[in-house]
Image: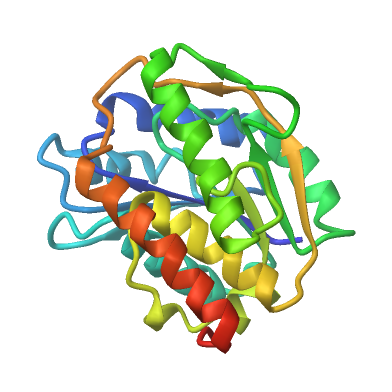
Amino acid sequence: MKTVVVTPTYNERRNISELIRAVNEISEQFHVLVVDDNSPDGTGDYVESLQDEFPNLHLLRRKAKMGLGSAYCEGFKYALKHDFDSIVQMDADLSHDPSEIPRMLDLLTQFDLILGSRYSDGVNVVRWPIRRLILSYGANKYTRWVTGLPVSDATGGFKCWSRKILESIDLTSIRSQGYSFQIEMTFRAWQKGFRIKEIPIIFHDRTVGESKMTRSIMFEAAAMVWRLRVWRIFGWYK
């Protein structure tokens, strides 16, 4: 399978080269696509400077900070346009372990979407404050209760998609960001009948840079789950 790792960036200059090198060490056949939202710290320029060293490194520059969801959608469109068979999405802050990618790709021969889950086998989170852990764990329980989505970690950002799922979803209709984007995309795949597999991963909180989590992102996710419930009842999704 022709594989691309899509990672959005905003002020990730201190992390991004380590991620690119880690993916390249696993396989030089993997491509990496960085979608940069005009990072003030020069992440985009730095990634561009690495392209001579890494021929399979791609860069999408955006004019301003436009949000995680739209960054992933732009990355997914790029992947489909350039004929990638499998699309891995992961954070640029090294909270997701690239060594899990081969396992996810192996499972993609049997399933359509692989979710790297923090909660499918206990709680596998390192260095998170207890308040944030309780908030995340509770949000996932709440999401499952409201929407019926049968996964334990709907808000996680480490996923491996088969191209046929992304081809089936109208990416131009996606407006959600942050946690709600993660929930909405998995919900749409589930409602379309695609095969979803969760695998346990260990999530490491970032050690460099700052979290992009805001209250508005949390409120958006809380509202989104009820919207998805209505969509499920009336079939208002595509």
Against 122, is 76 above or below? below
Against 122, is 88 above or below? below
**Nearer to me, 86 or 174:** 174
Residue 205's image quarter? top left
Residue 184 coordinates in the image, percent (x, y): 49, 64
- Looking at the image, residue 41 sits to the left or right of residue 70; the answer is left
Q: How is the image coloured?
A: rainbow
- Looking at the image, residue 123 sits to the left or right of residue 93; the answer is right
- Looking at the image, residue 72 sits to the left or right of residue 188; the answer is left
**Nearer to me, 185 or 171:** 185
Residue 150 coordinates in the image, percent (x, y): 71, 55
**Nearer to me, 167 or 31:** 167
Residue 101 coordinates in the image, percent (x, y): 69, 40
Residue drawn at 69 percent across, 79 percent down: 192
Against 234, is 192 above or below? above
Q: Quadrant of the C terminus?
A: bottom right
